[in-house]
């Protein structure tokens, strides 16, 4: 009997379905179903009751799960301890991050980390689109904003303020802005990556209101968003760290500084799986220390 099928069985039982188990194992639903069918054939029992809506353990499946789940967990823990036991980290660490964040934050932190771990190799993929971590073999994905998928394995590393910004020339041409409600009449540049790119909630002390913008332009790239607003194409909201140098230099103006927008986050997202590799944990710890030097 192939004991790896027992591991697949435990994953299906814990995840409550073949699709979720496949995501956890980095496999396909068809392959997981095939492994379970073979295990049932070898044991001569039915382990799962399957309907179109759910997968549940049979009596035999419940007994097998109760006996095997602790053993599988212990085995995986033992392998993880061995894999993480050495002081020197090895292998390849693949990271993805938005273009500006990759250049401004991840790259300098990675350069320091690489100098301390000469036996490792690194790949930094700068992309403003969200990559499939399993297909791209990504170990860590840095994401800014608000995570759409609450089931993702993510660690929040810090907070980001959202600023409404435009060029001085744009403001001179379109008139002063003294209240958030006026933004609905302006040329808003929307970031389509956001869950609700045209709806923004403003707060000042006890006053709160939501403004629905009219998009004159849309883009799926934070880098392009910054370029468009710096060229005077319109007004937008973006992370403070993305535009703080331009605001400090006077190339952009922060509009409505007395009003606060919802705080976004800086997240490290891991691919599906039971364990986070030592190399990923080590880099995230180093990146946290790097962030402290920038605060």
Image (tube, grey):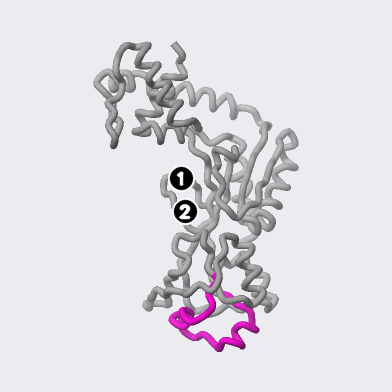
Residue 42 is drawn in which quadrant?
Answer: top left
**Separation (CA) of disc 2 from disc 1:** 8 Å
Q: Residues within 10 Å of mark 1 (few under 14, many from 20)?
A: few
In the image, residue 291 above or below residue 182? above
Q: Decide whether residue 176 is among the magenta residues.
A: yes
In the image, residue 71 above or below residue 250? above
Res. 30 in view: yes
Q: Decide whether residue 188 is among the magenta residues.
A: yes
Give percent across and percent down for residue 10.
39, 25
Q: Which residues are magenta?
A: 165-189
In the image, residue 242 above or below residue 124? below
In the image, residue 88 above or below residue 61? below
Res. 163 in view: no
Secondary structure found at label 2: loop
Task: Give 289 or 247, whichever is nearer the viewer.
Answer: 247
Q: Are marks 2 and 1 in contact (CB under 8 Å)?
A: yes
Secondary structure found at label 1: loop
Task: Give 35 or 11, whichever is nearer the viewer.
Answer: 35
Task: Give 15 or 90, whichever is nearer the viewer.
Answer: 15
User: In terms of sequence position, does the residue under pointer 2 or pointer 1 come before the other?
Assistant: 2
Residue position for label 1: 152
Residue position for label 2: 147
Q: Residue at x 47, y 53 (%)?
A: 147
Q: Quadrant of the C terminus?
A: bottom right
Task: Give 40 or 204, whichever is nearer the viewer.
Answer: 40
Give percent across and percent down for residue 284.
59, 45
265 horizontally vs 35: left or right:
right
């Amino acid at each position: 009997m192939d004991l790896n099928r027992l591991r697949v069985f435990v994953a299906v039982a814990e995840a409550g379905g073949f699709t979720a188990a496949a995501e956890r194992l980095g496999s396909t639903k068809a392959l997981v179903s095939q492994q379970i069918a073979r295990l049932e054939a070898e044991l001569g029992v039915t382990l799962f009751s399957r309907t179109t809506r759910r997968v549940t353990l049979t009596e035999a499946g419940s007994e097998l799960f109760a006996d095997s789940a602790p053993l599988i967990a212990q085995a995986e823990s033992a392998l993880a301890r061995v894999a993480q036991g050495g002081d020197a980290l090895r292998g390849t660490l693949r990271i993805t991050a938005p273009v500006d964040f990759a250049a401004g934050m991840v790259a300098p932190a990675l350069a320091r980390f690489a100098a301390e771990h000469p036996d490792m190799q690194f790949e930094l993929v700068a992309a403003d689109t969200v990559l499939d971590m399993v297909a791209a073999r990504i170990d860590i994905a840095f994401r800014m904003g608000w995570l759409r998928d609450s089931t993702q394995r993510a660690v929040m590393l810090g907070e980001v303020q959202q600023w409404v910004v435009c060029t001085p020339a744009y403001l001179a041409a379109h008139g002063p802005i003294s209240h958030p409600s006026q933004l609905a009449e302006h040329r808003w540049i929307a970031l389509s990556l956001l869950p609700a790119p045209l709806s923004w909630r403003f707060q000042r002390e006890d006053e709160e209101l939501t403004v629905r913008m009219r998009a004159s332009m849309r883009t799926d790239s934070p880098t392009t968003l910054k370029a468009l607003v710096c060229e005077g194409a319109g007004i937008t909201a973006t992370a403070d760290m993305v535009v703080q140098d331009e605001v400090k230099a006077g190339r952009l103006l922060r509009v409505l500084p007395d009003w606060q927008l919802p705080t976004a986050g800086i997240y490290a997202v891991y691919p599906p799986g039971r364990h986070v590799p030592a190399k990923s944990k080590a880099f995230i710890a180093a990146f946290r220390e790097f962030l402290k030097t920038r605060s």
